[in-house]
Image: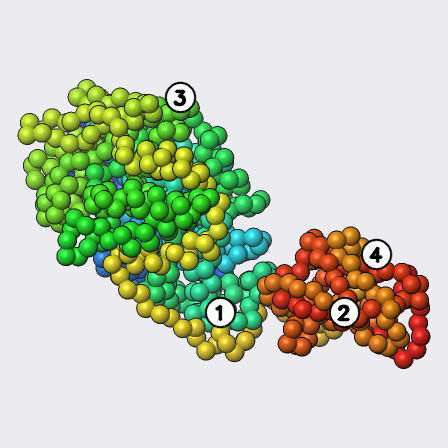
Amino acid sequence: MKVIYLNMVNYCYLIIYLNVRNGLIRGRRILNKNGNRGYVYLGIPYAETPSNILRFSVPTDKDNWEGELDATQYKDGCPWNTSTTDNKHDAYNTSENCLTVNVFTSASCLIYGNCPVVFFGLGGGFRFNSPVILDQTILIDNFANNDRNIIFVSFSHRLGMLGLLNLNNKLNLSTQPNILLFDTLKALKWVHKEIVQFGGDAARITLMGHSAGSCIMTYLSVSPKAYGLYDKVILMSAARLPFEFGNNNQNVSRQLAIHAECAFQSTDWDKVEDVENVLDCLRKKDVSELMSIQKLLEDSGVFFESISQDSGKNSFFERPIDVLEKVKPNVAMLLGTTKEEIGRGKNLLLKNNTTIVDVEKLKAVCNAFITAFDFEYVEAATNECVLQYKDDPYATIHIEDDLIFNLPILHQATLNSGRGLPTFLYQFEFSGSLNKSSQPSNFPYHGFELRYLVGLHSENMSIIEKIVQRQFSKMFISFIAKGNPGCEDIRFKQFDNKINNYFVVDFNYKLEISGMTNNYHEKASNFWNRILPDKVGSYNHESDEGDYLKVQKKCSSAMNNASYIELSYPESFYKGIDPPKPSNSYQTKSSILISCLLLISSIMVAFDFVLSIVQHALLYAGQKMRLHCTGMKYQKMGKCVIHLGGYAHDLYYKIRMYRLRLNKGSGEKLRMDPIAEREGTGITFTTSTPYRYSTGRQVTALKSGFKDDITSITLTPIAKRRHRAAT
């Protein structure tokens, strides 16, 4: 008996203390009210603190620590401050030292190993939230106990501007547009390497996310950088979003830099040095100041929306997402939504009559989504959208839910099943006490299912709800462990895209679960996937953020029933103050002199080159544009009239022995440079006064793409001596 007792003591010690690559960690045991026992290791860093010079940079490996790391309590969450949630913002429990993972495991997993793992990403619109809000006792009940033996891992990533800053996606900078995705990838790689120490099987990792966390898991699952790091995917209430512009978040990022007095009117956003100066300035700012500015921008209707379609060698995706999602790894997928989701479209109904749609507000919302999806004929598609929804108040209430939650989930199910892979679709419809106390419809809204799965808002559960918790979580446990959510009392069939079948998660008075039905969100699917494309053409994900921004604020105002403040730039913006130089960049006087000489030399060479191009263009090139200079005598002015539309520019070049000037009708002398970049469209010049060269030949002129309101061109000799015409 003593031997057994000593072994148990040794096991308890080994269970609490674990070694990972960076050092020793100390966790703790949880024994909840239901008698389930689990072991937790909280706040384990998976990367270095991304502050100071590491702010906005991809996460780097964590240095080893000495002694033991206390992993008994959660660490700080990542900084956030947003107007998009009623959750209380507590700056004292957040810091940039937040890139941590939390591991929940069982004694059986720790002793015997080879347990399946679930890697969970929480929602929050990419702007707020922390794993701290999840109920640890529910996680032990549903996953990490000796009965179920599923290791549950949550993690923190950078939020808002710290995770989505995008000053110019086309430049090779010291940052990347999708930093929060790189954080998630880093956390997943940590889990893949270290989970064996907690009793996990690195070959059986399931990605699971909810809302924005589900979007992140969708993007993670298609990135070649994550291939081989997971074997199943669970998507809850979101997948891909329509806002995947390459320059997504560029406007809000630059606005933030300006209001932080790190960017100015003189800042050249296409110049690497200028943008790096802005980044250096932002890295020196206190994070609370940046969060306050972000909140101020949100109050003016300017938001960090989502990830961006990046590209290039060091990018997260490397190739278009549309291409990647068709060739991603072959994995089983469980995915679904709640019956009501957010329902913000209720603000599109008239205030004094909840059965009549405010058509103008509806049009603003339709126009924004049509623009985001980049339909070829925006106006026609917008009108079709209005016709589809305006006479159906319930559909109008859920127009955003259709486009952000329901149809993206259906799209992923269709893609995965179309490749012959195990795919399971559900809709959560159970109405519990949380629904009844907070929602007039008495149906589950966005995130309500998390009450029963991961312990979000888990307080005051009834006996019936605890049974629902057990049954609902059983589906997920079965899928994580075996790749199929069905079990002895749950008949869950695979998704068939011919009938769009799905499992209804609801319970009758006998607490029997509902089961399968067909035609998942059929009306919305038919309209957006068939009717509308047939009428106005298909959509793509290649639009520019600029088009969406023109309609985004009006849409947000309608959906949120909100008025936004107007912001003015700080005085520093107009003073033209150059951004501060990076602290590690300096030049000696000699290097500055050399740089100036090289610059002057380059300008002279470039100017001669441009003059040569213009001269040859004037004298030899144009086939469609001809300047007839015949009959003009020495030192007289030849005037060549053209009529063009658009903006006025000025061209003033010396061409051999002549000055050439374009003039507006008002007589104002205008400038344009360089002509060589504007070749293309031919315009015919005619002369009001003839000009004779000594050769007596006609001179052909610019084959150019002017789009200006220039009314005349003037040739003037610059020397009082007879000269030969250029040949």
Instruction: Kindly identify the residue that appears in the image at 39 percent across and 28 percent down.
Output: 416
Q: Amino acid at mark 3?
A: Gly
Which disc, if any, is residue 688? 2
The mark nearer the N terminus, 1 or 4, is: 1
The mark nearer the N terminus, 4 or 2, is: 4
Which quarter of the picture shows residue 291? bottom left
| Closest to the observer, 20 or 614 | 614
Which residue is labeled 1 in the image? 262
Q: Residues within 10 Å of mark 3 (few under 14, many from 20)?
A: few
The mark nearer the N terminus, 3 or 2, is: 3
Q: Amino acid at mark 2?
A: Ser
Which residue is labeled 4 in the image? 620
- Is residue 148 rendered to the left or right of residue 615? left
Q: Amino acid at mark 1?
A: Cys
Q: Is residue 690 above or below residue 317?
A: below
The figure's colour scheme reads rainbow
Which residue is labeled 3 in the image? 420
| Closest to the observer, 73 or 350 | 350
Query: What element does badge 3 sit on?
Result: loop
